[in-house]
Amino acid sequence: MSDSVVRLTKSQPILIKCSKNCYNFSDFNNNKPQYFFELTINGKNIGKKYFRNIEEIKYSHLIKLDDKIILENIDNYELSVRIYHNGIDNIYKLKGKINQHNSNSTACSNQLYIEFTKNSSGYAMCSCFYTGLDQNKIFASPPN
């Protein structure tokens, strides 16, 4: 018979983010809203395309240079941002047309800001920001 050696290793505790008050423990992860950005673009040469991102921040890059979409091919768009926070679901929408004569096109509502820009090759980039109650923010685009 051979002797077998069993070694027990002690596991490390798992760190749980929580705040303690006199009534209970609360989880910080429940307080983070999730933002579901959805963009639909329409155009003669491209048809209808959809872009969707889920973010934990109020900002999302919806169209990237890797998508290789030419800005002049986009005629109009529909943007919706759905916010999930503490079991409450809010939806905000914005529709518009692209200004194809400029290198950028922007639009905003009380809750949403969207910007389309193009690089030197003509490819489009699109960014969206949920403003919500942050009406004092300034939006600026970097130069191409």
Image (spheres, helix red, strand yellow):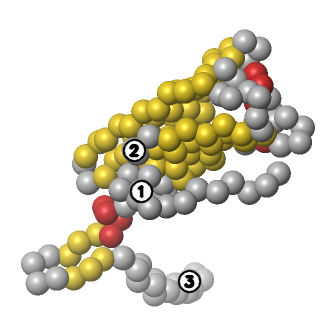
First of labels 2, 3 by sequence position: 3
Between disc 1 and disc 3, whose residue precedes?
A: 3
Label 1 sits on what residue type? Gln
The residue closer to the viewer here, 26 or 100, is 100
Amino acid under disc 2: Asn
Residue at 50% across, 86% down: 9
Specify whether residue 34 is in view. Answer: no
Residue 112 appears in the rendering? yes
The N terminus: image quadrant: bottom right
Give the distance between the C-alpha atoms of the residues marked 1 and 3, in whole angstroms.
69 Å
Dot in front, 2 or 3: 2
Q: Which residue is pictured at 36% across the width and 76% down the height? A: 17
* Residue 102 location, quadrant: top right
The residue lying at 42 percent from left, 33 percent from top is: 93
Residue 96 image position (x, y, % from top left): 55, 27
- Tell me, for residue 26, which label it has, or none: none
| CB-based contact (under 8 Å), mark 2 and mark 1 | yes
For residue 35, side relative to residue 62 (left or right): left
CA distance for labels 2 and 1: 8 Å
Q: Badge 2: how crowded within 10 Å, few (<14), some, or many (20+)?
A: few
Question: Quick one: which residue is furthest to the right in this view?
Answer: 121
Q: Is residue 79 above or below residue 4?
A: above
Q: Please tell me the numbered disc located at residue 4.
A: 3
The residue under label 1 is 135
How far apart are the two marked residues, 2 and 3, measured between alpha carbons? 71 Å
What element does badge 3 sit on?
loop
- Label 2 belongs to which residue? 110
Q: Nearer the viewer, mark 1 or mark 3?
A: 1
| Residue at 69% over, 17% down | 43
Kind of residue at disc 3: Ser
